[in-house]
Structure formats: C-alpha cells, structure tokens
Amino acid sequence: MSLRKAATEVRENAYVPYSGFKVGAAIKGASGAVYVGCNVENAAYPEGTCAEAGAIAAMVAGGETEIAKVLVIADSPLPVSPCGGCRQKLAEFSAPDTPVTLATTDGKTEETTVATLLPGAFSDAYMEQG
Ligand code: THU
C-alpha cells in the first residue's frame, strides 16, 4: 500500500474532539514495512500526541529504527507542516536526506527532507566527549 493511502486511511481514526483537526502519518521503514499513526488528543491538552509520534511508536514497536520515507496528511490549505517536536522525533530515526512528503487531502503535496525541516538537529553526537 502507498504511504499516501495508508496515511489517508489512518487519518480517519484520529481522536480529535478538541481541535477537530485530523492528521495521518505513514512511515516506510528500512525493511519496506509501513507503519501508521494518527493524532490522539486528550482533555489535558498537552498530553495529546501527534500523528508522526504515533507512526514512530508503531515503527519502533514493530522492531525497526530506520525511517526510509515518511508522509503526513491533513485537511489543510497548505501541505501540513510537522510541529517542532515531531521534527526532532523524525530526525532521531532518519538520515538528513530522508524524504518527507507533506500532503493535503485535496491533493497538494510538498516534497522535503528531514534536514530541511530541522537544520542543525540535536543528536547523540553532541553528547560525545573526547
Ligand atoms: N498535529 C499532528 O498530529 N501533526 C502535525 O504535523 C501537526 C499537528 C496535531 C496535533 C493536534 O492534535 C492537532 O494536530 C492540532 O494541532
């Protein structure tokens, strides 16, 4: 199944009683397997989780830690832009040039990369000394 179809389908399951804004994400792991996630909100607003975080959690739970590509989709006027926290979460499991497709439900897309979304990402390399 294409990443677009997978993200479109899982988006329907988003739990968004507070924002009403459904987001779907699909990740292709290095193995070729596809992992999906949707946003899950909470009455305690900061406890909500983004679609990207859900897809990353599914990937790791499935035994993979390498993102080959990712697609995020929402019903937005412009291709949906991942939040800052999700950019950092994607960077943890990606190469700088890992492709990211941002999409709208009405067919607009923007192709970018993890490093373009988060230049200068913090990584474990900064914790090495000597
Ligand atoms: N959201 C995502 O799930 N991913 C994004 O890339 C942008 C924002 C969610 C968080 C919240 O549930 C809703 O969209 C509105 O911010």
Image: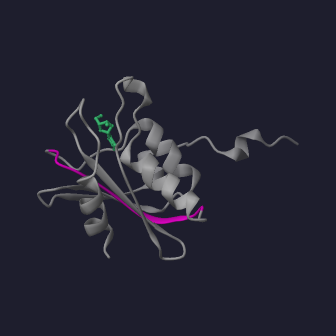
Q: Position of residue 87 (x, y in %)?
A: 46, 44
Q: Nearer the viewer, residue 102 or 113?
A: 102
Position of 14 with respect to 115 (left or right) is left
Indicate the quadrant containing the C terminus: top left, top right, bottom left or bottom right: top right
Q: Could you tell me if residue 94 is visible in this image?
A: no
Position of 46 with respect to 122 (left or right) is left
- Determine if the magenta segment contains residue 67: yes
Ligand 1 placement by image quarter: top left
Q: Nearer the viewer, residue 78 or 116?
A: 78
Q: Nearer the viewer, residue 67 or 8?
A: 8
Q: Is residue 2 above or below residue 99?
A: below
Identify the image quadrant of residue 65.
Answer: bottom right
Indicate the quadrant containing the N terminus: top left, top right, bottom left or bottom right: bottom left
Residue at 44%, 29% (x, y): give it. Answer: 47
Main SS category, magenta section = strand
Q: Is residue 12 above or below residue 44?
A: below
Residue at 35%, 55% (x, y): give it. Answer: 25
The magenta segment is: 65-76
- Determine if the magenta segment contains residue 104: no
Q: Position of residue 124 (x, y in %)?
A: 70, 45
Residue at 25%, 62% (x, y): give it. Answer: 9
Tally the numbered discs. 0
Position of 108 with respect to 90 (left or right) is left
